[in-house]
Structures are given as structure tokens and as C-alpha cells.
Image (spheres, grey):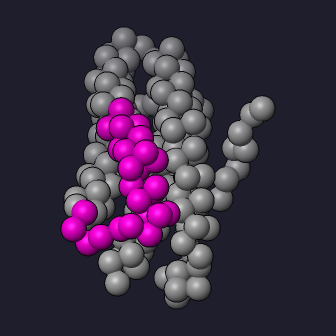
């Protein structure tokens, strides 16, 4: 059975967080994990390949460097999601959360992922602007921008959960 691919990644407005059920927020975070790991990361990998197939050698060599940087960040994200799914979310779901847990470090990792993806995106746009005519290139850029937006919303939800659990 194919997963739903149009999952909405919008978090409730901050004022609505207070009225949101912790379980529904955790479910939204899990949906975002699926969107990130099962849809966005594989699609971005595929679009790097499609752009590479459509470019000349010079642009291709530059693109390979950026694809490799992205692959490293993508693996960090997958590892991070695994830890969230196996340790953090069960802990938050059980109500056994304590401020002693290093959650601030987790939130900072989200910021680092976003920054690195933005760096890759900016480097691609600055160094491969000659590829703007390619549809594959434009789709790659859109997918990277979508990933950043999803990670931002994801981090907001987690920050809320962590802070609410500490109170």
C-alpha cells in the first residue's frame, strides 16, 4: 500500500499549541518523518540524478559535489529521525519526560540540518545558475526548499513538545 504523499506539514499556530493534544502533535511529527524520509529525501536524490543526466561534464562535476554534501546531510537526518522514533517520541508519549534529557541539543541539530541544506541550496543556485533552464534543476530547487520548510515546521512542533513537557 502506497503512503499518502500529500501530508500537510503545517504546525498549528503557536496559540493553538496549548489546545493541541500531545498525541496529535506526536502523530503529526511522525507523519513529517514519513514525508521527509520516504518522500522528500528519495525524490531529492532522484532529482540530483536527473539533473546530472541532463548536464554537461563541467556542471555535472560541480553538481556531484553538492549531491555528495546533500547525501551526507540526508543520512544525518535519517539517523536523527530513527533516534526520535525509537527513543524521543516514545519518551514524550509515555509522559516520562524529564528536563534532564538533552532535548536542547536535539533542537539545535534541527537548526544545523536546515542550515546545511540551505548552504547546499545556495551553493547550487550560485554555482549552477546556467542550469536554470532545465526543468529537472528547477524541480530539484523546489524540493530542497520544501525540505527546509518541513524541517522548520517539524522543529517548531518538537520545540513546543519539549518545552510543554518540561513544565
159 left or right of 37? left
Residue at 34% x, 20% y is 64
Q: Position of residue 63 (x, y in %)?
A: 36, 24
In this rendering, is residue 161 above or below 67? below
Q: Position of residue 10 (x, y in %)?
A: 58, 66
Residue at 22% x, 61% y is 102
In this rendering, is residue 89 above or below 123? below
Q: Position of residue 80 (x, y in %)?
A: 35, 44
Q: Main secondary structure of the magenta part?
A: helix
Q: Nearer the viewer, residue 97 or 64?
A: 97
Which residues lie in the magenta part? 75-101
The quarter in which the C terminus is drawn is bottom left
Q: Is residue 98 visible?
A: yes
Q: Position of residue 151 (x, y in %)?
A: 44, 55
Residue at 61% x, 67% y is 24
The quarter in which the N terminus is drawn is top right
Residue at 46% x, 55% y is 90
Q: Nearer the viewer, residue 22 or 6?
A: 22
Amino acid at each position: 500500500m502506497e503512503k499518502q504523499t500529500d501530508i500537510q506539514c503545517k504546525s498549528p499556530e503557536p496559540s493553538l499549541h496549548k489546545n493541541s493534544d500531545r498525541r496529535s502533535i506526536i502523530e503529526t511529527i511522525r507523519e513529517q518523518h514519513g514525508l521527509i524520509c520516504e518522500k522528500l529525501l528519495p525524490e531529492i536524490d532522484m532529482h540530483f540524478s536527473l539533473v546530472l543526466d541532463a548536464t554537461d561534464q563541467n556542471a555535472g562535476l560541480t553538481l556531484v559535489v553538492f549531491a555528495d554534501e546533500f547525501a551526507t546531510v540526508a543520512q544525518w537526518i535519517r539517523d536523527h529521525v530513527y533516534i526520535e522514533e525509537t527513543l524521543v517520541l516514545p519518551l514524550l508519549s509515555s509522559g516520562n519526560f524529564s528536563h534532564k534529557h538533552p532535548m536542547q541539543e536535539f533542537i539545535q541539530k534541527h537548526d544545523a540540518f536546515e542550515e546545511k541544506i540551505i548552504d547546499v541550496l545556495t551553493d547550487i543556485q550560485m554555482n549552477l545558475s546556467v542550469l536554470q533552464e532545465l526543468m529537472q534543476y528547477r524541480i530539484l530547487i523546489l524540493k530542497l526548499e520544501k525540505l527546509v520548510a518541513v524541517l522548520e515546521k517539524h522543529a517548531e512542533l518538537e520545540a513546543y513538545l519539549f518545552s510543554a513537557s518540561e513544565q
